[in-house]
Every structure is written in structure tokens, then in C-alpha cells.
Amino acid sequence: MAVAVGVEVQRGRMVIRNVGLMLSGKLEAPILRADCVVAEGGRIVAVGREQDCDTGRATVVIDAQGCALTPGLIDSHVHPVFGDWTPRQSQLGWIESTLNGGVTTMISAGEVHLPGRPRDIVGLKALAITAQRAYANFRPAGVKVLGGAPVIEQGMVESDFAELAAAGVSLLGEVGLGSVKAGYEAQEMVAWARKYGIQSTIHTGGPSVPGSGYIDADTVLQADADIIGHINGGHTALPLNQIRCLCEGCGRGIEIVHNGNELAGLSALRFARELGQMERVILGTDGPAGSGVQPLGILRMIALLSSLGDVPAEEMFCAATGNTARLRKLDCGMIEVGRAADFVLMDRAQHSAGADLLDSVQKGDLPGIGMVVVDGIVRCGRSRNTPPAERVPVVVG
Ligand SMILES: [Zn+2]
């Protein structure tokens, strides 16, 4: 897709050297033998040992000081409205705050908190198209918000989905938040959406707020959306045997969110690992919500699931990056040539009991972020939200 009006483009060439640990975002090889990455035009053009990379003609040189580098984190489940404002808890700047938690891409699961949100079909389509356009043209603090996710309602017909797709809408909001709650109704609309290249996600579990519905495992399986949205509930989770059925009964994305049931989240992770299908596990916050806004929500999920779920930290980073990029067909989330130059530089927090970054996360501590880069542009230095890290990258040229 062409870069939209109002979106800043990287000029020149960025070299990041002296990376102590290069996390790839790819489950099959989560740690790369590399200490250097080069970006140009917002894309990764080289990654490897510094002596093997063309580091000439650099306009920005960053000495990582031995910090770890991960792909920018992806929040698979957010509820934005417009700009960097959320009416849910009357907050401004929540997306900028989340950038300070290492998130460079957010995926809307519906702009459901808009006061007076239209529920008639022409109105919901207009809102989705407006939100898609607005976030394509404006990136709060540089964060890529994939917005414009309509909440489907009874009465929609196939041509509505064709029209939405033609207008640039590529996501459905959580199925089940509108009047379409029965499995057979959802199945038909999800299939129409898929036919026109629109991805779908479904609300799983008990109602999130008064007015939303209860969606059980049978309905989720029948609807067959691309992503089992908050498999651990938002907040109220299904019984664990139903969560196991969802993991075993289909091959769709297993989305675990911050604003869900933590026991259910850990259980879903265990079921996916027992099936040998860790590549299906992706992470979200489901914020803003009744639980508030969680600027460090994705980092907290990585630390929670790695420590209590006994999963190597480098694999949990994949669940917040490459797994999501693959399931969602995004051009970011992995450190490889041609991908978006979205990076987070981080290190073990000061005074963590862990021996290094990965060990500290496996012991449940959050890392300290020292820099975030989106599309080859530095968007923040030392995070104002994470605990301070031992080491911080330095711009040296
Ligand atoms: Zn939900």
C-alpha cells in the first residue's frame, strides 16, 4: 500500500551496531548470530555481523552498547477511537505511552468506544472507513495503528463486505460485540469477509461490558474467524476444557490478552505447546478497557507467560512479533531483509535478579527499554515507562 499523506518517511541510512543479542521474532530461530542491522527507506537492508554488513553512507549510527534488539512489538488487540485519545478512561496520549512500552504496531479489534457509535449498516461502514483513513494518515507518536474494524450487525449482506474491502477496510472488529452472536450467522459473514480479503477476530468468553454477549467454544468454532480473540476472556474466560477444545479443534490464531483471565491465558499457552503449535500464539492487551490502558501490557504478557508458563523468553518475544506478523500478514515483526525497520532496544532492568535480559524476563521482570525505532526513525530514547536498564543505546553519528 502506498504511504499515506502525513506519514513521515525515513531519509538516509541507519546503522545499529554493537547489538548484544539479536532476537529475530521467528520461532524457528529466535536468536540470530548478528550484532548489526542497517535500515534504509524504512526497511531492513542488512543484518549480520558488522564486518559482513555494508555500513557505509550512514546518516544515523546507533551504538547499542550491547543491548538486545527485538522487532517492534505488535499489540494484536486494541480498541482505539480517534487520534491518541480514548474515551474509555478519558485519556490522552495512551498510544504514545504504549510506544514507550515497545509497541510499534497496534491492530484494532473495533472502534467500539466511540461515544454514540453507529450500529446501523451505513453508519458502521462509514465509521470503519473513516477510522481506517484517519489512522493511515496519522500515526500517533509514530505508532502504526491498523484501524477501521467494523463491528458486524444483523442485516449485512455480501455486497457490504465487498464495499468495505474496496474502500480499504482489512479487518473486522470483534465478532459478537454487535447483534451477530449466533454461530451460523457469524460463519456466513466471516466467510464473506474472508472472500474479500478482510481478516476477522471473534470475542471469546463472557460479556466484557453490559450489552455485549457471551460467546462459547461451539460458537467460536462455528464462526471460524481467523483469530480466536482473547481466548483467555475479556475478562471472563470460558471453562478450561472449552479453551482446550478451541486449541485442539481448529488451527486459528490463539490470542492471549493482558485484560483477560491470567490462569486461562497460561492454560491456553500450555495447550498450544502440548500441540506443538506455539506459532499460533499471539499477544494483545485488549485495551483501552474497563481495566484501563496498559502501556507496558505486551511486555507484561511476555514476562508473565515466560515466567509462570515456563517458556524461554526468546519464544515469548516471537508471540509478540513474528507470530502476529505471519498470522496477520504484516510486513513487520521479524528481523530480516525487506521487513519494516521497527526495532526495540532493551536490556535487563537495573537490579533484576536475572543474569541477563532473557533470564530476567524468565524470572518475571520487565526489561528496560532504551530506544524504539519505527520504519527506520527513532521515536523514543530511554523509555519513560519501563524500569531503567543497565545499558542504554547511544546515537553516535
Ligand atoms: Zn472482546
Image (tube, rainbow, N blue to C red):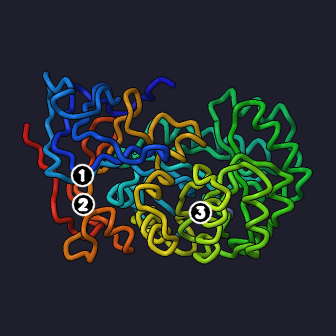
Q: Secondary structure at mark 2?
A: strand
Identified at 68% across, 71% down, the residue is: 208
Disc 3 residue type (three-letter): Ile
Which residue is identified by label 1? Answer: 371
| The CB of the residue at mark 1 lies under 8 Å from ligand 1 | no
| Left or right for 391, reference 293 | left
Marker disc for residue 256? 3
Observer-nearest of 204 and 81: 204
Give the total number of marks visible in the rendering. 3
Q: Residue furthest right?
A: 184
Residue 215: x %, y % from top left: 80, 65
Identified at 61% across, 60% down, the residue is: 273
| The CB of the residue at mark 3 lies under 8 Å from ligand 1 | no
Task: Indicate which disc, 2 or 1, sits on the residue closer to the N terminus.
Answer: 2
Residue 73: x %, y % from top left: 42, 51
Distance from Cα at disc 1 to Cα at disc 3: 26 Å
Marker disc for residue 35? none
Task: Indicate which disc, 1 or 3, sits on the residue closer to the N terminus.
Answer: 3
Distance from Cα at disc 2 to Cα at disc 1: 10 Å
Residue 378: x %, y % from top left: 24, 43
Marker disc for residue 347? 2
Identified at 18% across, 33% down, the residue is: 50
What is the quadrant of residue 334 in the picture?
A: top left
Residue 116 visible, this angle: no
**Up-down relation of residue 212 to residue 175 (above or below):** below
| Left or right for 21, reference 318 | left
Residue 155: x %, y % from top left: 89, 46
Q: Residues within 10 Å of mark 2 (few under 14, many from 20)?
A: many
Say which quadrant the C terminus sits in.
top left
**Up-down relation of residue 238 to residue 131 (above or below):** below
Identified at 29% across, 44% down, the residue is: 373
Distance from Cα at disc 2 to Cα at disc 3: 25 Å
